[in-house]
Image: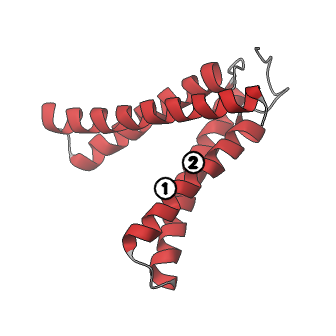
Amino acid sequence: MTIRLLRQLVCFGIVGVAATLTHYLMALGSHEGLGLNLYAANLLGYVTAMTVSFYGHGWLTFRVTLTRSTLQRFVIASVSTFLSSEILLWALETGTSLPHRITLSIVVISVPVVSFILNKFWVYRPGSAASGT
C-alpha cells in the first residue's frame, strides 16, 4: 500500500466521521431545537453531511479542484450508494436468516468500501479536474 493511498484512506475516514456527526447533530438540532419534522430534519442533516463530504473529500482526501461535473458525479454516487445500501439490507433481511445485527453490520462495512472506490476512481478521478498534490 502506498503512502498516498494510506493517507487517502485515513482522510476518507476522518471526513466520513465528520460528515456522520454533522448529519446527526444537524438533524437532532433542527428537530429538537427548531421543531422541524423529524423526517425533514433528517433530510436537512443528510444534505448538510453531503456538503461536508463533497468538500472534505475533494480538498482533503483526494486533493482535486472541485467542478460542477465533480459535484454531479458526487451526488449520483452518494444517492446510488444510499439506495444500494437499502437494497442490500432488504435483500439480506428477506433472503437470509441472519440476525439484523449481522445484516446491518454487512451494510455498514460494505458501503464505505464501495463509496471509497466510487469516489477515488469516478467522482474525484485523476485527470477529471486539475489535481492538487
**94 relative to 44, above or below:** below
**118 relative to 17, above or below:** below
Q: Residue furthest right?
A: 127
- The residue shown at (51%, 61%) is 107
- The residue shown at (53%, 68%) is 87
Viewer-proximal residue among 41 and 126 = 126
What is the x, y in percent for residue 67?
70, 22
Residue 35 visible within the image: no
- The residue shown at (36%, 34%) is 21
Residue 51 visible within the image: yes
* Residue bearing the label numbered 1: 108
What is the x, y in percent for residue 31?
19, 39
**100 relative to 64, above or below:** below
Q: CA distance from mark 2 to mark 1?
A: 7 Å
Say what amino acid the circle numbered 1 marks.
Val
* Residue bearing the label numbered 2: 112
Judge from the rendering whether residue 19 lies leftward or rightward of residue 38; answer left or right.
right
**57 relative to 77, above or below:** above
Say what amino acid the circle numbered 2 marks.
Pro
What is the x, y in percent for residue 42?
32, 44
Marker disc for residue 127: none
**Contact, CB < 8 Å: mark 2 with mark 1?**
yes
What is the x, y in percent for residue 120?
72, 37
Judge from the rendering whether residue 36 lies leftward or rightward of residue 43; answer left or right.
left
**Element at label 1:** helix
Q: Residue furthest top?
A: 133
